[in-house]
Image (cartoon, rainbow, N blue to C red):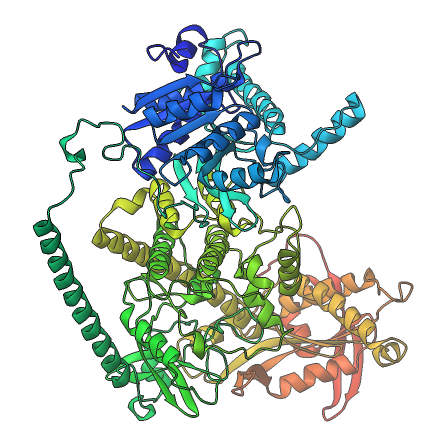
Amino acid sequence: MDSNYTLLQAKNEHYRTLVRTGPSAPKLGEFVVTLHGHFNWTARAALLYLDARTDDRPHYFTIEGVFEALQGSNLSVQHQVYAREPGGPEQATHFIRANGRIVYICGPLEMLHEILLQAQRENLTNGDYVFFYLDVFGESLRAGPTRSTGRPWQDNRTREQAQALREAFQTVLVITYREPPNPEYQEFQNRLLIRAREDFGVELAPSLMNLIAGCFYDGILLYAEVLNETIQEGGTREDGLRIVEKMQGRRYHGVTGLVVMDKNNDRETDFVLWAMGDLDSGDFQPAAHYSGAEKQIWWTGRPIPWVKGAPPLDNPPCAFDLDDPSCDKTPLSTLAIVALGTGITFIMFGVSSFLIFRKLMLEKELASMLWRIRWEELQFGNSERYHKGAGSRLTLSLRGSSYGSLMTAHGKYQIFANTGHFKGNVVAIKHVNKKRIELTRQVLFELKHMRDVQFNHLTRFIGACIDPPNICIVTEYCPRGSLQDILENDSINLDWMFRYSLINDLVKGMAFLHNSIIASHGSLKSSNCVVDSRFVLKITDYGLASFRSTAEPDDSHALYAKKLWTAPELLGGNPLPTTGMQKADVYSFGIILQEIALRSGPFYLEGLDLSPKEIVQKVRNGQRPYFRPSIDRTQLNEELVLLMERCWAQEPAERPDFGQIKGFIRRFNKEGGTSILDNLLLRMEQYANNLEKLVEERTQAYLEEKRKAEALLYQILPHSVAEQLKRGETVQAEAFDSVTIYFSDIVGFTALSAESTPMQVVTLLNDLYTCFDAIIDNFDVYKVETIGDAYMVVSGLPGRNGQRHAPEIARMALALLDAVSSFRIRHRPHDQLRLRIGVHTGPVCAGVVGLKMPRYCLFGDTVNTASRMESNGQALKIHVSSTTKDALDELGCFQLELRGDVEMKGKGKMRTYWLLGERKGPTGLL
């Protein structure tokens, strides 16, 4: 290997248009350097590989990337080709002893077995050495019982050799490419196997080898996308350098997941580190995942079984530099041994005394029960008094629910917190659905731990009341409500700075909780995250497992609604260790992350309408592709989507911990670097701006509703009267010297109604009066009322119009009579409506009558006379009185015909006329 001429130099000098969308050796080297940094291996390493030179030298080119990367990190790196001949294993172990404790081996599995058997015989597997096997396609792991485990130590050797191999493999870590976890790749691989069988007669098995085909597929996608952009910008497909430059640093989502190209047009590659996770079965399981795009290792939580309990040193004292004076092994003198023993005795005595003192103080604290609150110390009063200024919903349930039950019976909406006063402060009170609490030692420790845990992003535990039947938990009250409340409130505008602030608060709180004595939450959901008056998110309902109980029936809607955030492994009902509960919290965080990003509720499924029970059952089944919420990749940050998918991975070991999540969010949260004060001021400024916008929207909505109400009022009452009422004035009755009143009804309406259904009658009247209303808008008249088929209109009030009232009513009556001639009844199209009209002119008095449903009414003999004119008229004729005739004669343009003297009820004989029409031509109209 030429250390002065690297793979990268060769690529940049001779292959400038080369783009690698698949795995490459330099990326393997980057992962190895990251591993060395994690384990603090900074001195030396040894490389063993097979290089027969009769093939395409795959092992040489694989380990060359590791060699160049380690040497570029200023490590002393020695390499040797493995000799496939008698004495080869002995030469290999001799090389290892002389050159390094961190050993990388690249070759066939049989070669690794030979080296490890010799290392076992020479006691090199005692924990002082670690062997990394570079098996990028995972061929050695195929012997495992499942796809997520492997047994590379299995071989057709004697029982003694097989047992020796199994023990030696405890010091082996296997490095492979990471299989893409996205559903698109699984579907692509299935189609690939089918096409290989149907088109070429080749039976392929699911393997990491298929990853290369997927990477070629993504390469074609990348080339097509960049080529289109180049041509659109005026370039040509022959301009290779220009095309390659546009590919640098590009990110896109391909069939193998997120594709990230670096500045050298090499794809960032993900790897998996495998270790013997189960010493009983010998199964190798993923210990860590490496993200090339993030340059970060995500540990699965499965500990690496170091033989000596810790990683070996890469350059231990006296291992390689024997000339160091500190390596002198001369025995200590008797005096030195006595002095050393005396010192150790005093140290042990001091430590023992300190531990005894701590034990006594602990027992004293447990006995004092500083957390206890008497029921009489809690003050309750007018809820308005306590909620004034807060006015928000808080996700703490009322009496009758369990500690952690945060929803109503329908499992959706939050309710007001049950609050009270304790020592002058408003507190949240959570009633516990238990008859009594036994103060066992475990319960006392739980309560002590709750008092000890204090953090800015955890609600402060104030105390607990255990006086039956008033058993409750008292915690800090956060008036802004829960995160779920805020997300479901469409009137609150949350930009991404604000959302990232909430996410960051949540991550900080969970990271602290996982590192505390409580260790995990176990019921994390958006309704368990509350926001205080400064818009700081805090986590609540953690700890106190002894106070929890289940109040809902096993099959209730609320129970399944609360499980939408629950990890698949918890839905099975099996108890998990603390580390398992922490990974379950990460899953819940992933659901909350999607909830914050989309603001469409927990576990949003685009295009699907499933009940919470159906969703929970699908998640519990765990069938591929795994059932997860919908993600809109076009609207969200790709790194945020990637974090969601990792958090809700099916395998708990593949989920990151909150320490890793904190670093991940810090990278793409640009506002995260501001100070606490700046961040708080930004939050408050955004909230103030949001309130201003909300006030403006509500003001506009109010003005619109006011306009609608006024329009309705103007339809019920005259405009002048309505204005008086709006000003709060009393409407006085008013006398009018001369107005003209119109009455009409339909002849034969009673018989028509008897032959029609009620709905047909309503439709008829609505059509008729809609027609009439459209016509009278063209005249200076006021519609007084309609009663059944009767229609009453007046002109000359409430706005006086001189002598124009009579001609206005006359022209309106003629127009209505003309409209009736062409009016058609829907359910009886061949029948003709016969309208009967009466008109009279005279003085009236008008005013508003009543307080509820007020009406503008006309009073006086003129009204009665107009009504009599209508009732004594004839169908399809306009019957007018002599006073109306006199008013019309002043204009000289209306045609009237004498009817004669007609007997009117209550009036005696009156001379009346028929209005026939209006003459055309110039007239002296007013």
Q: Residue 13 location in percent, x, y?
A: 40, 7
What residue sits 58% from the left and 36% below the top?
141
- The answer to which of 368 and 441 lies nearer the viewer is 441
* Above/below status of 487 relative to 250: below
* Above/below status of 230 relative to 183: above
Q: Is residue 67 left or right of residue 676?
A: right
What residue sits 43% from the left and 6% below the top?
14
Task: Find residue 43 and report its image quarter.
Answer: top left
What residue sits 50% from the left and 78% below the top?
549
Task: Find residue 839 and report its image quarter.
Answer: bottom right
What residue sits 57% from the left and 38% below the top?
162
- The answer to which of 210 and 84 lies nearer the viewer is 84
Farthest front residue in view: 334
Q: Residue 412 location in percent, x, y?
A: 54, 68
Q: Residue 98 location in percent, x, y?
A: 33, 24
- The answer to which of 311 and 856 lies nearer the viewer is 311
